[in-house]
Amino acid sequence: MNAEIVTIGRELLDGSRSDTNTVYLGSRLWALGTEVVRSTTVPDEPAAIEDAVGRALEAADIVITTGGLGPTSDDRTKHVVARLFARKLVLDEDVLARLYAYFEELGREMPEINMSQAMIPEGARVIMNTRGTAPGLVLEKDDAVLFSLPGVPSEMRAMVENYVVPFLEGRGLVRLVQERVIRTTGIPESTVAERTGDLARKLIRTEVAYLPSMTGVDLKVVARGDTPAEAARTADRSAERLADRLGSYVYARGGESIEKVVGYLLAMGEATLAVAESCTGGRLGWRVTKVPGSSDYFLGGVVAYADELKKRLLGVKAGTLKRHGAVSAEVASEMAAGVRKKTGASYALSITGTAGPGGGTAEKPVGLVYVGVAWERGERVSEFRFPGGRGQVRERAAQAALDSLRRVLLNIEAP
Amino acid sequence: MNAEIVTIGRELLDGSRSDTNTVYLGSRLWALGTEVVRSTTVPDEPAAIEDAVGRALEAADIVITTGGLGPTSDDRTKHVVARLFARKLVLDEDVLARLYAYFEELGREMPEINMSQAMIPEGARVIMNTRGTAPGLVLEKDDAVLFSLPGVPSEMRAMVENYVVPFLEGRGLVRLVQERVIRTTGIPESTVAERTGDLARKLIRTEVAYLPSMTGVDLKVVARGDTPAEAARTADRSAERLADRLGSYVYARGGESIEKVVGYLLAMGEATLAVAESCTGGRLGWRVTKVPGSSDYFLGGVVAYADELKKRLLGVKAGTLKRHGAVSAEVASEMAAGVRKKTGASYALSITGTAGPGGGTAEKPVGLVYVGVAWERGERVSEFRFPGGRGQVRERAAQAALDSLRRVLLNIEAP
């Protein structure tokens, strides 16, 4: 079985919005063993939608459209779909009831304009929208099935997970490929490739893709088998051999985020964490608290953007700031120790650096970052020099700080 | 003139990579007054590439392809393009010399495999690659022009800026459309549409698109004119009339982020800001410090994720926590007052809420958030109930806090 994706909306073609739906759908369909053979983006114009969806229905077994189901006048998908399947639009009482309930929960009256969302092509299955107002639609024709989903990513994703995936599994789609994502940080792509390239080429029924990003290099390990179990075994074996080549630079073998890995290690040790951030402005705390349940180990911390607050809230000494400057190993050390003392956390993590665009000097250039880790019996301060602009330096600093903590928690050396 | 984009690469269809080239090209073409009427993504397969590029050349005046020009065997675009234009591939000495020079600069010998990159469809214009090895190609047929560019975003962008844009300007492309982006927050899309829909339909030579996101609704106002200046005047006038309908929900008329708007207002008033965050874990500080130069007004703050830290670092009273709970107007108020006192900031902003997935009760459900603003002569606390999961609640809470501060700084009421 193969699939086509049609994403609808002028905002995807004029640079206003990036099309995140295609990458998500591609990944979910891929996980079901289905190849996406084409993805087309068209504006909210009936003729363009009809051409793209019509062609997709001819070429593919599964067609998924996103966008164009909202209540405003530029949302045309439903009318086109009804025409392509030769159906009338009829009022669906269940959808209408759901719309009323949705607005009632919000404590608002339903605007007139939303009424049109309860009109459904006759005989279509409806996927209820648990996060918004536009219902999804399922229609079948010959051997092809069409899923017409809203364009808002969170609404679309909920429908895919709760309906589209189970539906396709019900049709017998089985995953004969399995993937493992090995995640590394602190090691450049060329070094990753040099260390693993020969092995990656030799591995049986396994493909390896290198996916570098701002915060590290992922290895996507894709294994095939004659059964799902065999594919899984091959994937595990291949991932293990590759990960062994990369040693302590690997922080996850199952695609987990580094904040999740660190959270797991803290929870395992019944430890707590506090943070002291300067140039990252809160990024570290935000990332740590992305993990549901992080309140079990994360206490909080201090954002000491101004030097005055480094003294007032963290107890950094005026003399240290004066002698070494705010961006220094000494200040990173005092920040970590300070926040640990103020909060009573078992571990403390600090960041101080120059993110730019201004503020760099020959001695302390933009990209220079110090990370401190403090715990009951020790401390570790590391220096980093990151390339890139303000956004990149700040993101890389947060990543390096989380990795420094991971290394301390696992009792492995700094890289 | 209209345009089509064809992006090539299986990694764009299986969820490995998001297609950032389309959004970039869409925005650059739009700025030249050219509408992208379709964008297609196909895998590195000659038949799929030929179908997509062939169709694009029939439908559009300008076709841009990205990807499939590298030296590896899955890079097929050049062969397909040569066939579509009925050209032979011939060795281009200039490209070959450039390839040798490229590898010499890197201090490496040129791999055999890269030789193929010097083969060019006969008569094609070549765009030299200043950042990599794959040259870009320009071919013309009837009234259509094809630009075939590499898939690596930085290489592709350099070619667009240094060659494609000047080439199209040479063909007389002028921007006869102008856009303004009106940004709103705190008002649902349907209400925005109801308030502005009749006006949006009446406005002369202006189109309005509604772009909802997790943190608000943007109105993209696109105006046309017979000259660029006339288009700009129409855009300004239309944007002003639309914004008037939306009153204080509008925080920007030129597409600026709310953290930039708030930063501008603080800097104008020579004021400073500190934050006290609970459920957002640092998001507020991170967003405020995204703005370069934010150190002029942002001091820092406290992330008080654990209740103990609300007491220790912010001076929230144990009795208040006990009587009203951590998620309460009273605690938001004491958090804001506390961080203002600790930091000496002129304005303080606080957030406390239940982000989920756990922790919700009937009385204090997931999504309940309180925002506090404190300043020398007053305070304001607002209650919000946000839909969505943990990520959405936290992002919306940060947005609502920034908007609450904006409203205080502008001396306008809470919504």
Image (cartoon, coloured by chain):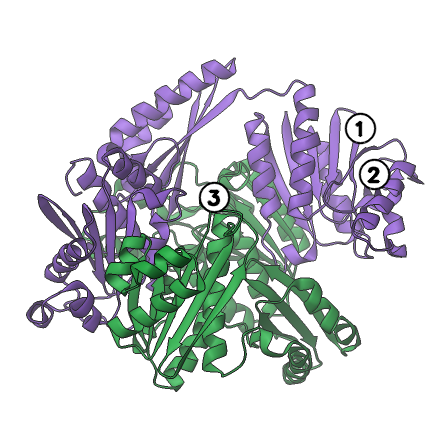
Chain colours: A green, B purple
> Looking at the picture, does residue A372 appear above or below residue B61?
below
What residue is pinned by disc 3?
A357
User: How far separated are the C-alphas under marks 1 and 2?
Assistant: 10 Å
The residue at which mark 2 appears reads as B84
Task: Depth check: give the residue in front, B182 or B319.
Answer: B319
Q: Chain of mark 1?
A: B
CA–CA distance in space, label 2 to label 3: 47 Å
- For the C terminus of chain B, the image quarter is top left
State the residue in front, B225 or B197.
B225
Q: Residues within 10 Å of mark 3 (few under 14, many from 20)?
A: few
**Distance in Å between CA atoms under marks 1 and 3:** 46 Å
Camera-side mark, 1 or 3? 3
The residue that disc 1 covers is B141
For the residue labelled by badge 2, is the local secondary structure a helix, a strand or a loop?
A: helix
Q: Position of residue B400 (x, y in %)?
A: 26, 49
The x, y position of residue A404, in whole percent, is 48, 72
Locate residue B185 relative to residue A22 in the image: left or right.
left
A238 relative to B232 in the view: left or right: right
Residue type of the residue flagged with mark 1: Lys
A275 and B229: which one is in front? A275
Tell me where residue A296 sits by quadrant: bottom left
Task: Assign a secondary structure to mark 3.
Answer: loop
- The answer to which image quadrant residue A297 occupies is bottom left
Instruction: Residue B32: tell me if it is visible.
Output: yes
Q: Residues within 10 Å of mark 2 (few under 14, many from 20)?
A: some
Question: Are both tags, 1 and 3, on one chain?
Answer: no
Kindly identify the residue that appears in the image at 43 percent across and 41 percent down.
A75
Q: Position of residue A15 (x, y in %)?
A: 53, 38
- Examine the rendering and report whether any part of residue A281 can be seen: no
Q: Are marks 1 and 2 in contact (CB under 8 Å)?
A: yes
The residue at 61%/57% (across/down) is B17
